[in-house]
Image: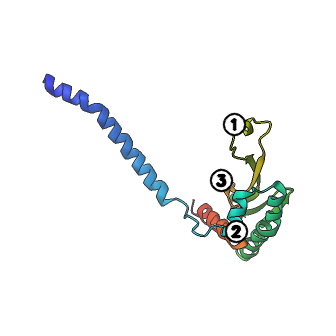
Amino acid sequence: GALQAATLAAALPFVLIMILLSIGLVRQMNADLAGRSVETEGPPLAERLKRILAPASRADIVKEIDRHGLPALETVRAALEAEEPDAEIGTDEAAAWLTLRHGERTFVYRIGARSRPRPTMTARETSQGRRLLEWRLMAQTGDGARPHDITGFTHDQIVADVLEQLQRWRLA
């Protein structure tokens, strides 16, 4: 009896670890089933190199919203007009958004300029007062999902992203 009790006592921590691993595996499999598809086509090579070597300013991002973002949202709104006449576009200084009301639910897709400190290469650049900012074009839906970077996306890529987010919202 004592040997069996000792064996069970020694195995108990491993049982708990295996149960936690199984729970984590099931949760991740469910997340994979409901996950986003990965964008296979990113921004053009020249655009990506430009963003790496010379990060965008706020003015660059505002121009990108005007040049690609707002027309993409307008394209989606025009396509939705036949099905959902309650779609509208709003803008402010450095952002644009598409709002769609469907019954009691509301879908919001917002693109806007966001800043973050630029990466530093030396210890002298790390003081917060001296760090430069880089700006990114970020997209976010109103359902609390994390914002994602769409800097450098073309008109068609932004339209595809809006439609993907709209599909996830409708299926939720």
- At label 1, which amino acid type do we have? Ala
Q: Which mark is residue 92?
A: none
Amino acid type at mark 2: Ala
Instruction: Please tell me which of labels 2 and 3 falls first in the chain.
Output: 2
Camera-nearest label, 2 or 3: 2
- From the viewer's perspective, is residue 14 above or below residue 162? above
Front-most of residues 108 and 41: 41
Using the rendered image of the protein, determine whether residue 93 is visible from the camera's viewpoint: yes
- Indicate the position of residue 165 as horizontal and vertical percent values: 63, 63
- Point out the image quarter for the N terminus: top left
Task: Please state which amino acid type lies under the numbered disc 3.
Answer: Asp
Residue 141: quarter of image: bottom right
| Callouts 3 and 1 close, C-beta under 8 Å | no
User: SS for tag 1?
Assistant: helix
Q: In terms of secondary structure, where does tag 2 sit?
A: helix
Q: Is residue 30 left or right of residue 11?
A: right
Residue in the foreground of this view, choosing between 87 and 166: 166
Q: Quadrant of the C terminus?
A: bottom right
